[in-house]
Amino acid sequence: MSGLRSRAGAFARHLEARFRIVTFAGTLVPTVSALGVQLVAFALTARGLGLEAFGIYTALLAVSALSVELVGLGGADLLVRGVAREPERFASYFGNLLILTGLTLPLVVLGGVWVAHGVMESPLPVLFVALVIGGEILIGRAAASLELVMVAHRQTVRAGAVRFTTAFVRLLAAAIFFAALGRSDLEGWIEVAFLQSVITTALYLALSIRLYGRPRAVLLTRDLWTGLSFCLNQASRSSQGSLDRIVLSRFADAASVGIYGAASRVLTLGLFPLQVVTRMTYPNFFVHGGRGGIAASRRYALSVVPVMLGVGLAACGAVSLAGFLAPAVLGRDFESMVGVTAALSFSLPLMALQYPAADALTGAGYQGLRAVLSVTAAFGFGIIMAFGARLDGIEGLVIAFLSCHALFAAVLWTAAFRVRDRPEGREMAPA
């Protein structure tokens, strides 16, 4: 009898492993397709605008990428956590997300415009700065929220399809503007991209309601602090991938920012495979951490490290290859991005090591600590990268960028092993 049970258990584990592989592959296909589509859209945009105009544009995109995480005050992450534990409360979490998004969006856009125009001294008129930042924040928040809604329902393949659709629609707009119409003016492209963002956002909202039901107009005030900690964490992580371009725009000319921006854009594509894995594992951290505390959450984190590291190394190689081939597509002006892209790609394995440790803290109820570490790291990133850029331009910035990511990975794992459960403060998942 014991032998039969052992074989049955082994067979069940085999099926579970196969299911995970199939799910990963099913999620990876649309995500990898989105990578290709984004790469083509990026190539059309960079080549169409030219090196200097693209440098101005990519600096504004960096501000948008940082700002988008502040919209909603972590309402989307609250939804993932809440629905993972209490699926029947989706309508309330969805309504809370929409209310917080509506309240924070105007303020965040104004803040982004102030940074871009006042601090970075963008040469564009204020109206066009606002259109870039507002449009990119709008579509970024809408797409990310819809993806997280699908992740909360364990529909990661659908979430990957949303990412592909978002990239494809932007590619379509770029193809019409740059290829079909033959235009190359930055201000005209900003107007087209803004209109596309507004339309796509409206369609995503309608799709969310059709698939999962109408939201309930409830503001979950008791969860505001938890949501804020999620928000600060995500914004801090986003800043680690955006501050470099913002900093460089203050210490270098538009052409240098264009080179670095093109390289960092290729690097961003390499993050997608890592995000596929994290979306599959993220809800599980709440289950393990809620029932077994930091020890269980940490064990689960260690179990996913080999996969994350393997994906990070593969992404590193793919990004280096893409950077080598990019000048053939973008033009001779972008030839110097090859070495920059190869160097930046080494940050991907370092980022892959950060995610499991950070999610282990979140799953065990230490989101506040994670937020504090992330915010502190964001300030540290900014100071170190500013020093590196001022000292040695792009080369100094790259060295500072890699050093910061290695240090942050070490800090997160140290925290994951140092913290201990506080029985009175740890939330228990429902049995």
Image: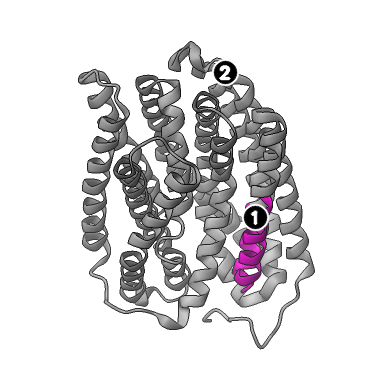
Please give the range of residues in magenta. 355-381
The residue to which callout 2 is attached is 324
Amino acid at dot 1: Phe
Percent across and percent down for residue 291 are: 61, 77
Amino acid at dot 2: Phe
Residue sitting nearer the eye, 393 or 84: 393
**Which residue lies at the image location 63% right of the left edge and 32% below the top edge?**
345
Percent across and percent down for residue 350 are: 69, 43
Quarter in which the N terminus is drawn: bottom right
**Which residue lies at the image location 66% right of the left edge and 42% below the top edge?**
386
Percent across and percent down for residue 422 are: 71, 82
Q: Residues within 10 Å of mark 1 (few under 14, many from 20)?
A: some
Is disc 2 placed on a helix, strand or loop? helix
**Which residue lies at the image location 29% right of the left edge and 32% below the top edge?**
187
Quadrant of the image occupied by residue 232: bottom right
Q: Is residue 413 left or right of residue 258?
A: right
Residue 97 in view (yes/no): yes
Decide which of tag 1 and tag 2 comes sooner along the chain.
Answer: 2
**From what the image shows, is residue 177 above or below residue 381?**
above
Percent across and percent down for residue 222 are: 46, 83
Q: Verify whether residue 370 appears in magenta.
A: yes
Q: Is residue 7 left or right of residue 157?
A: right
**From what the image shows, is residue 304 above or below residue 165?**
below
- State the separation of the CA atoms marked 1 and 2: 32 Å
Q: Verify whether residue 338 appears in magenta.
A: no
Is disc 1 placed on a helix, strand or loop? helix
Res 318 label: none
Q: Are marks 1 and 2 in contact (CB under 8 Å)?
A: no
The residue to which callout 1 is attached is 379
